[in-house]
Image (cartoon, rainbow, N blue to C red):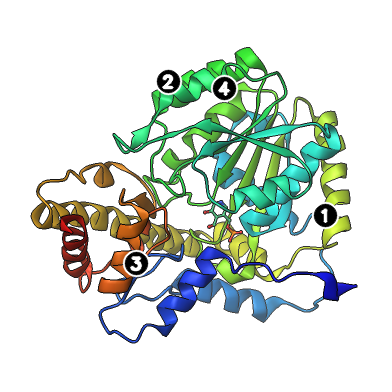
Amino acid sequence: MLERLERLPIDSILGLMALYRADTDPRKVDLGVGVYRDDQGHTPILSCVRRAEQAVLGRQTTKSYVAAAGNAGFNQAMAQLVLGEGHPVLAADRVRSIQATGGCGALRLGAELFRAAQPETVVHVSTPTWANHVPLLSGCGLKLERYPYYDPATGGVKFDAMLGTLDRLPARSVVLLHASCHNPTGADLSETQWRELLDLFKRRSLLPFIDIAYQGLGTGLAEDAFGIRLFCAELPEVAVAVSCSKNFGLYRERTGCLHVISESPTAGDATLSHQVRIARSIYSMPPDHGAAIVHEILGDPGYREQWMEELAGMRKRITGLRHELVKHLARACPQRDFGFIAGQRGMFSFLGVDVPQVRALREQHHVYMTDDSRINIAGLSADNIEYFARAVAQVLRN
Ligand SMILES: Cc1ncc(COP(=O)(O)O)c(C=O)c1O
């Protein structure tokens, strides 16, 4: 039976990683893969994670199953982290959370939940959006459509076009929003725009599904969750997919959760029963280790403070690199304005060059990025930023 399967083309980002690894030039620069890197090019284990991990392992007495919904203390701490302590939906007992295998797992659990509630659900995603949103959300059979979002002319959001499209959607359409640090563009909604969007969601009875994978890496923990906190306070139903991969550096531990805000505690209980059934039918129980570490960090004032410092360090490095990059590019290619990069947030930006130029950067200058010219800002460092800016200038001149 299986011999009938035809070989699939290699995933483009995995293909890019293989090309980078095979490149022996010492000047090579990896701006492709979406992981945080320090100035030495490492993706470090945070010190708070090392300490909390030791504490967890020292206390652990069993490896028996936890629960299909995962670690209840972790789920609760994550709801407080995303919503902010004292949020009205917490007080009203309207939040139900389930641990997930990273942000990807949370996105898939959310999609499966919408399918269970309403099989004909259409999910609307931004143009462009993170490539993996497509298989994660449509893989369970939901239809996907797109709304306008990024404006390459300004490096910002095409907000009027976005509103125009969303204002035509039927009630109970699901709209996927990036809370902050939009992947792949770095273009975020302002607080005023979130408020305007809220009015539209109310008017048209749309259901927001908000993806937060970079809380604390944009402007700050509260600022990066502004839209979530606002929407959850004002709308009857919201779903939030959370990833701890980037802000806790726990990538391989597959740590995240899905929060669902329902209209009432009773509706919440019904929703949770479906979330648990869905999880049981896919993988039964989530992995424990990463969630136990995050629970330990958020519950211990010392570890928590250290985490916030380390997170601020990552955020400042990214923001600093954005400004440095704009300076270097302004010097190397004065004919083109790259100032928009400094106004964007998070790890990614579109450089705004075409596919032949992306290929030239790779083949002639050993600089690796995806064909859409998305660059991982954290892949830059004091050692390679000038080399990178000069390579861009050369490619633009040719
Ligand atoms: C926008 C977005 N959402 C979700 C995720 C989920 O990440 P993970 O499943 O590794 O936690 C990522 C990771 O790159 C992302 O960029």
- Residue 160 circle label: 2
Label 2 vs label 1, nearer the camera = 2
Q: Residue at x 21, y 60 (%)?
A: 395
- Residue 166 circle label: 4
| Relative image position of residue 276 (x, y in whole percent) | 85, 50
- Horizontal arrangement in the rendering, residue 90 relative to residue 225 (left or right): right
Residue underneath mark 1: 279
- Marks 2 and 1, how far apart at CA: 38 Å
Query: How packed is label 3: few (under 14 Cα within 10 Å), some, or many (20 or more)?
Result: many
Name the residue at the top extreme: 203
Marks 2/3 in contact by CB < 8 Å: the verdict is no
Q: Residue 385's quadrant in the figure?
A: bottom left
Marks 2/4 in contact by CB < 8 Å: the verdict is no
- Marks 2 and 3, how far apart at CA: 33 Å
Q: Residue at x 30, y 51 (%)?
A: 353
Marks 2/1 in contact by CB < 8 Å: the verdict is no
Label 3 vs label 4, nearer the camera = 4
- Marks 3 and 4, how far apart at CA: 35 Å
Q: Is residue 304 visible?
A: yes
The amino acid beneath tag 4 is Leu
- Residue 379 circle label: 3
Query: How packed is label 4: few (under 14 Cα within 10 Å), some, or many (20 or more)?
Result: many
Q: Which of 39 and 299 lies nearest the eye of the viewer?
A: 39
Q: Residue at x 83, y 30 (%)?
A: 267
Q: Which of 103 and 231 lies nearest the eye of the viewer?
A: 103
The amino acid beneath tag 3 is Gly
Q: Which of 31 and 269 lies nearest the eye of the viewer?
A: 31
Q: Earlier in the sequence, mark 3 or mark 4?
A: 4
The amino acid beneath tag 1 is Ala
Q: Earlier in the sequence, mark 2 or mark 4?
A: 2
Label 3 vs label 1, nearer the camera = 3
Q: Determine if the C-beta at disc 4 is less than 8 A from ligand 1.
A: no
